[in-house]
Image (cartoon, grey):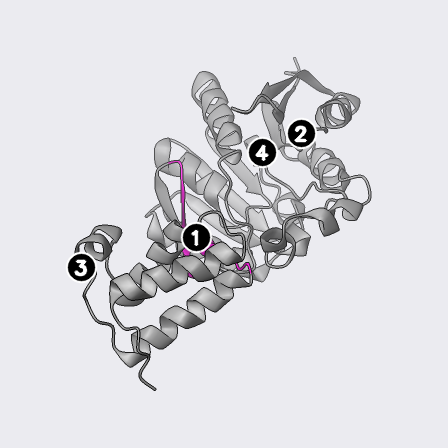
């Protein structure tokens, strides 16, 4: 069926209105990106070719995508990619969408790796693989092993390992947290993780695009939000070399709880780093070097 609106300018104008009425603040950018995806052109092309006509199939696809976005599907899932620290990662439903906050965790980990000349790195609860892969991409003299219990995360991380060309130095396995590495008697200098940490009773209060589309198992950290911190911290003691480090991303109100957890398990030099908004974001601790 031929839609009477077929030109880029007309379709964008209508798309803007549809998404704006739904209260989507990024309505203009989202429409541009979705239409660009349909016609396989960038935003500059859309700007300079307002009279370019789409065929029926393209128009139908644009309205299909608009409906998904109207229903609050995250734009990153629809585009199938997300930028993180200047790198383009493949993502899809079933893995957490990378957030800029996690850059603080990666930057902190890289600083410790360089300072201590660490070589063997573990990224647990890897999701799309952004933490371990970014570290391997930006620091050439490290080896990374990543793990996630989700098969989707395993597949997406595997795809990103290929996409970023780090296959010689990054591996991914399906594992319940660190259990596979413990079975294999692996050893690491650094274990880094952005685990699920939102309290169970808070999940329902999250924004629609988060609670309705992002994987529950990648968000929920149990009744108090600390389930994964407890287990990873305990398991890490079986894997970290002397002087090795454990680094976590945390929620804004979890500094004391996670810091105390590390101290109770024998970690020293436990510190908290803030994000660019001034919120507590990263906890790091070290295994004391034994004589």
Give the residues in magenta: 72-85
> Is residue 68 depicted above or below 279 in this figure?
below
Could you tell me how far apart the alpha carbons at marks 1 and 4 are, in whole angstroms?
39 Å
Q: Quadrant of the N terminus?
A: bottom left
Could you tell me how far apart the alpha carbons at marks 2 and 1 are, in whole angstroms?
29 Å
Q: Mark 3, residues whose alpha carbon is within 10 Å: few (<14), some, or many (≥20)?
A: few
| Mark 3 and mark 2 residues within 8 Å of each other at the beta carbon | no
Q: Is residue 82 visible in the rendered structure shown here?
A: yes
Viewer-side label of 1, 4: 1
* Element on which disc 2 rests: loop
Viewer-side label of 2, 4: 2
* Element on which disc 1 rests: helix
Label 2: which residue?
A: 252
Could you tell me how far apart the alpha carbons at marks 3 and 1 are, in whole angstroms?
20 Å
Label 3: which residue?
A: 49
Residue 73 within the segment the image draws in magenta? yes
Could you tell me how far apart the alpha carbons at marks 4 and 3 are, in whole angstroms?
50 Å
Label 1: which residue?
A: 27
Looking at the image, tell me whether mark 3 or mark 2 is earlier in sequence order: 3
Of residues 88 and 45, the one nearer the viewer is: 45
Q: Quadrant of residue 215?
A: bottom right
Viewer-side label of 3, 2: 3
Q: Could you say which disc has been placed on residue 146 in the image?
A: none
Could you tell me how far apart the alpha carbons at marks 3 and 2 are, in whole angstroms?
45 Å
The picture places residue 196, in percent across and down from the top left corner, at: 67, 44
Q: Does 210 sit left or right of 157 as displayed? A: right
Could you tell me how far apart the alpha carbons at marks 2 and 4 are, in whole angstroms?
21 Å
């Amino acid at each position: 069926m031929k839609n009477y609106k077929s030109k880029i300018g007309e379709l964008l104008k209508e798309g803007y209105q549809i998404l704006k009425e739904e209260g989507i603040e990024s309505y203009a950018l989202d429409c541009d990106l979705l239409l660009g995806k349909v016609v396989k052109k960038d935003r500059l092309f859309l700007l300079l070719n307002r009279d370019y006509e789409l065929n029926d199939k393209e128009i139908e696809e644009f309205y299909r995508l608009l409906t998904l976005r109207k229903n609050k599907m995250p734009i990153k899932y629809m585009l199938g990619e997300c930028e993180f620290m200047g790198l383009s990662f493949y993502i899809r439903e079933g893995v957490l969408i990378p957030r800029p906050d996690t850059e603080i965790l990666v930057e902190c980990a890289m600083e410790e790796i360089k300072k201590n000349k660490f070589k063997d790195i573990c990224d647990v609860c890897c999701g799309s693989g952004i933490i371990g892969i970014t570290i391997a991409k930006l620091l050439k003299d490290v080896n990374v092993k990543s793990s996630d219990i989700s098969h989707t995360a395993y597949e997406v991380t595997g795809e990103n390992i290929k996409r970023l060309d780090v296959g010689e130095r990054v591996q991914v396995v399906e594992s319940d947290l660190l259990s596979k590495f413990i079975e294999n008697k692996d050893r690491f200098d650094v274990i880094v993780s952005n685990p699920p940490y939102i309290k169970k009773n808070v999940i329902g209060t999250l924004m629609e695009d988060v609670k309705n589309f992002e994987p529950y198992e990648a968000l929920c950290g149990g009744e108090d939000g600390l389930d994964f911190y407890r287990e990873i911290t305990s398991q890490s003691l079986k894997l970290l070399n002397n002087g090795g480090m454990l680094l976590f991303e945390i929620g804004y109100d979890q500094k004391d709880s996670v810091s105390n957890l590390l101290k109770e398990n024998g970690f020293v030099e436990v510190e908290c780093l803030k994000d660019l908004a001034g919120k507590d974001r990263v906890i790091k601790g070290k295994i004391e070097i034994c004589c």
